[in-house]
Amino acid sequence: MGLLVVGSLGLDTVATPFDRVENALGGSAVYISLAASYFSGPIYLVGVVGEDFPKKYIKLLENHNIDLEGLQIVQGGKTFRWSGKYHYDLNVRDTLLTELNVFEEFNPIIPDKFKKSKFVCLGNIDPTLQIKVLDQMENPQFVVCDTMNYWIEGKMDALSVLLKRVNVLIINDSEARLLAKEANLIKASKKIRDMGPEILIIKKGEHGALLFADDMVFSAPAYPMEMIYDPTGAGDSFAGGFTGYLHKTQDLSHENMKRAVIYGSAMASFCVEKFSTKGLEDLEYLRVHDRYREFLDLSRFDDK
Ligand code: AMP
C-alpha cells in the first residue's frame, strides 16, 4: 500500500546570498514525495497545479515512482507561487510572496486506490484541507502533519481540530513557540502534545531536531555542512525521509522513530546542498544510507 502525501506543488522564486532562481519546482508535497521516494513506494500524491505547471516537472515526479492520479490540473488556472529571500544567516528568511492561486479553490479528492493507505503525510497546506483529506481516508493508522506560522496565526480553529487527529506533528522551533505561546521548547512540547499529537518533532535548522514521545526526548544533530546553497524545502525533506523510512520498515517503535529522525535529517542535508529540488533528484539509496551512518559517528562517544 502506498504512502499518501498531500501538500503544495509550486513554482518558487528564491534568493540566497549566493544565487537566485525563478519559478523553480517547489512546494511541500514535492519535497516530501521526492525525499520519501528513496525509501518506499509508490508515493500517492494529492495536490493541485495550474495549466502553467511545466510538463518536465510532471515527468520528474513520475520518474520517482510518484503516482499522480490524485493531482488535479486546473485548465486556465495558475500554479501556487511562493518567493523567499534568505539572510546572511540562512536560518532567517523573509517570505516575499505567497500566491495561493489554484489552491484557493482546491478541493482535495482522494482517488479510491489511495483511500486505503495506512500512512499519511500531510504537508504544509491550509489545515481545513488537511482535515478534508483525513475525512476521506478509510482507516489511516499513522498520520504525520506539518504546518507553519501562516496557518497558526490565521487558521488556529481548524488547526486545533486537526491536531487531535494526527500522530506526529513536525514543526520548527519558532512555530512551536508560537503554537504553544511558550518560549521554552521543553514546556512548549508538553503543551503541544496536550493538543493532540502523541509525538512531536521540533526542527531547529542547522542545530538539528528534537523528538518527543511519552517521557522520551531524543536530540538529533544536523549534518555539519560547509556550504548550504538553498535551505528551502529542508523541513519537508525531513518529513519525507522520516515518514518514508517508517513506511518502508512498518515499525513504529520509539527506537525506530529515532532512526527515522536521522534519515529525515539526512534527506534535509541532501536537499540544502543544491538549489530547489536538485539535491533530491538523482540520489541513490546507498548514498542516503552512507550519510545515515555518518550521523552515527557524529554523536557517538565513549564515557571514559
Ligand atoms: P520549507 O522550506 O520546508 O518551509 O518549505 C518551503 C516550501 O513550502 C516551498 O517550496 C514553498 O513553495 C512551500 N510553501 C511556502 N509557503 C506555503 C504555504 N503557505 N502553503 C503551502 N506551501 C507553502
Image (tube, rainbow, N blue to C red):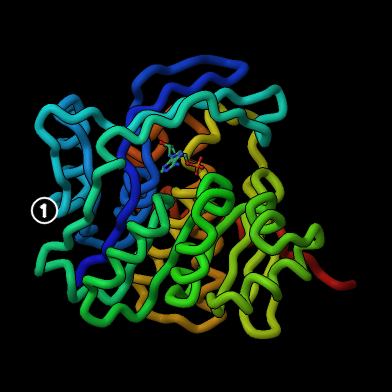
- Please state the horizontal and vertical placement of residue 115, each as a whole percent of the image: 18, 71
Please give the name of the residue rendered at 39% of the width and 45% of the height, measured from the top-left corner.
Answer: 28
- Total numbered labels placed on residues in the image: 1
The residue nearer to you, when weighing 63 against 107, is 107
Q: Amino acid at mark 1?
A: Glu
**Relative to 22, residue 194 above or below:** below
Q: Quadrant of residue 158?
A: bottom left
Question: Judging from the image, what secondary structure is the residue with disc 1 in?
Answer: strand
Q: Is residue 162 left or right of residue 110?
A: right
Residue 29 seen by the camera: yes
Q: Nearer the viewer, residue 90 or 250?
A: 90
Tell me what residue is drawn at x 22 percent, y 43 percent. 48
Foreground pick, 201 / 101: 101
Q: Quadrant of ligand 1?
A: top left
Q: Where 140 falls versus 41 (above or below)?
A: below
x and y, in percent, of residue 96 in the image: 53, 24
- Left or right of 65? Residue 201 is right
- Residue pictured at 65% horizontal, 45% vertical: 205
Asked if residue 141 is positioned above or below residue 69 in the image, the reply reads below
Indicate the quadrant containing the C terminus: top left, top right, bottom left or bottom right: bottom right
Label 1 CB less than 8 angstroms from ligand 1: no
Mark 1: give few (<14), some (14-19) or many (20+) Cα within 10 Å.
some
> In the drawing, does residue 104 fall left or right of residue 171?
left
Which residue is under mark 1?
Answer: 69
Q: Position of residue 171 (x, y in %)?
A: 57, 56
Where does the N terminus fall, quadrant-wise? bottom left
Where 65 falls versus 91 (above or below)? below
Residue 266 showing in the rendered view: no
Residue drawn 58% across and 47% down? 149
Nearest the eye: 194 or 218: 194
Q: Position of residue 283 (x, y in %)?
A: 35, 42
